[in-house]
Image (tube, rainbow, N blue to C red):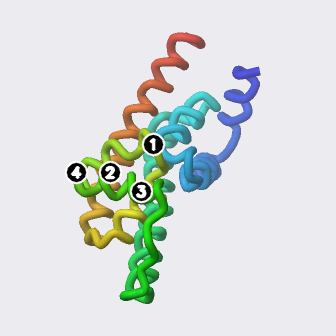
Amino acid sequence: MLADLQDYTATVDPIWQWLVIMAAAAVPFIESYFAAPIGILAGASPLVAIPAAILGNVISMVLVVLLAGRVRGAAGAHEQPLSPRRERFKRRFDAWGVPGVSLLGQTLLPSQITSGLMVGFGASRQRVILWQIVSITLWGLGFGLLGLGFVAAVVG
């Protein structure tokens, strides 16, 4: 079945491979770290799957950061008390800062959620975007290479 999927993917125009992988990576909990290896397992070139997954994840994260910045600006002084879950995240944010939450937060929550929360807590949108791009790239590249290794071990 995997061989059939890979044969089919090889016949699909690379632009469609890019678009499908980018769309998958834009979905929270799939993101770059699952979309890249899934694309590779499906038969897309790692040179297509990894950058497409990173780009799709980055685009969705940037949109969330920009929206969160607007919501925070509109909310102004009308802040609600934090739920226990948000309070726990806030404590981690205060301890780890934007770089730590960006790099380690992907183990717990999608980048879109962590980036939105950080901006909601007052972090600079530019700083969040920068560190999230670093994180998304590292996670996408790492898991993409793991997927490539898995395919090489199973197929090759």
**Which residue: 30% across, 63% down?**
128
- Residue 102: which disc? 2
Q: Earlier in the sequence, mark 4 or mark 3?
A: 4
Instruction: Say which of 104 and 140 sits in front.
Output: 104
Vertically, is 134 above or below 47?
below
Q: Are marks 2 and 4 in contact (CB under 8 Å)?
A: no
Mark 1 is surrounded, within 10 Å at the Cα level, by few (under 14), some (14 to 19) or many (20 or more) other residues, namely few
Real-space CA distance between mark 2 and mark 3, rounded to the nearest whole angstrom: 7 Å
- 4 vs 1, front mark: 4
Residue at image mark 3: 114
Vertically, is 74 above or below 53?
below
Residue 149: image x %, image y %?
46, 19
Q: Are marks 2 and 3 in contact (CB under 8 Å)?
A: yes
Real-space CA distance between mark 2 and mark 4, rounded to the nearest whole angstrom: 13 Å
Residue at image mark 1: 108
Q: Earlier in the sequence, mark 2 or mark 4?
A: 4
In this picture, residue 153 sits left or right of residue 126: right
Residue 45: image x %, image y %?
52, 34
Real-space CA distance between mark 2 and mark 1, rounded to the nearest whole angstrom: 11 Å
Q: Quadrant of residue 82?
A: bottom left
Q: Quadrant of residue 78?
A: bottom left
Residue 16: image x %, image y %?
64, 51
Mark 3 lies on a secondary structure that is: helix
Q: Quadrant of residue 130?
A: bottom left
Instruction: Say which of 73 and 138 sits in front.
Output: 73
User: Which amino acid type is marked by label 2?
Assistant: Ser
Q: Earlier in the sequence, mark 2 or mark 3?
A: 2
**Which residue: 30% across, 50% down?**
92
Residue at image mark 4: 95
- Residue 49: which disc? none
